[in-house]
Image (cartoon, grey):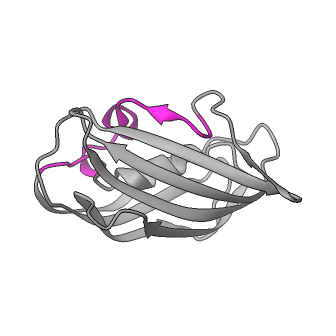
Amino acid sequence: MSGILPVILVVLSVAAGSVRSLGLSSCDGSATVKIKSLDLSPGEIHPGQDLLINAQWDVLGDVSKPVKAELKFSKSLGFFRIQVPCVNNIGSCTYENICRMAGSGELCNFSRGSHSASSVRFKIPHASTNVAGTYDMEVRLIDGSGRKLGCWSGRITVKQ
């Protein structure tokens, strides 16, 4: 991966009101891409506002492009857990070429070695619906040859 994970997280929160917290951990100890640090600021994200991303990551092997991302989001509703569907490219979606989405070459560096991106700016669109709540998420990156590059899971809390 590259610092593209922040891009994916931004894409996932596009319809959100404000993101209050983000927890992220690796669900693959043998990942080709290792995230060393990830910082999203400001701490509370509001629609129409800019988001700054700072990230550091290592790519431990060769990566075939394009790089695909598979995202899964689920939300607890009482005793039930439901998967958030993919609607308008937001939610539990597969993105076939995340570098095309990234907009910043700085965040899409998959060459072997250590990489960083600082103060990469993204505009968060205005929310059209209320999506407040706490969501569990999983992000898997897969290279062009079908090899899994990494997996990250976490929880994100969205406040309208």
In this rendering, position of residue 145 left or right of residue 46: left
Q: Position of residue 45 (x, y in %)?
A: 63, 60
Please indicate, yes or no, whether residue 6 appears anywhere in the rendered image: yes
Name the residue nearer the viewer: 70 or 28. Answer: 28
How many badges with numbers are in the image? 0
Identify the residue at horizontal 58%, vertical 55% (top origin). Answer: 137
Q: Position of residue 31 (x, y in %)?
A: 27, 60
Residue 23 highlighted magenta (yes or no): no
Identify the residue at horizontal 52%, vertical 57% (top origin). Answer: 51
Indicate the quadrant where residue 133 lies.
bottom right
In this rendering, position of residue 39 left or right of residue 66: right
Q: Position of residue 143 (x, y in %)?
A: 25, 39
> From the viewer's perspective, is residue 12 above or below residue 89?
below
In this rendering, position of residue 3 left or right of residue 154: left
Which quadrant: the C terminus? Answer: bottom right
> From the viewer's perspective, is residue 6 above or below residue 29?
above
Identify the residue at horizontal 31%, vertical 68% (top origin). Answer: 29
Residue 94 highlighted magenta (yes or no): yes
Please indicate, yes or no, whether residue 121 appears anywhere in the rendered image: no
Q: Which residues are magenta?
A: 90-111
Name the residue nearer the viewer: 107 or 95. Answer: 95
Name the residue nearer the viewer: 48 or 160. Answer: 160
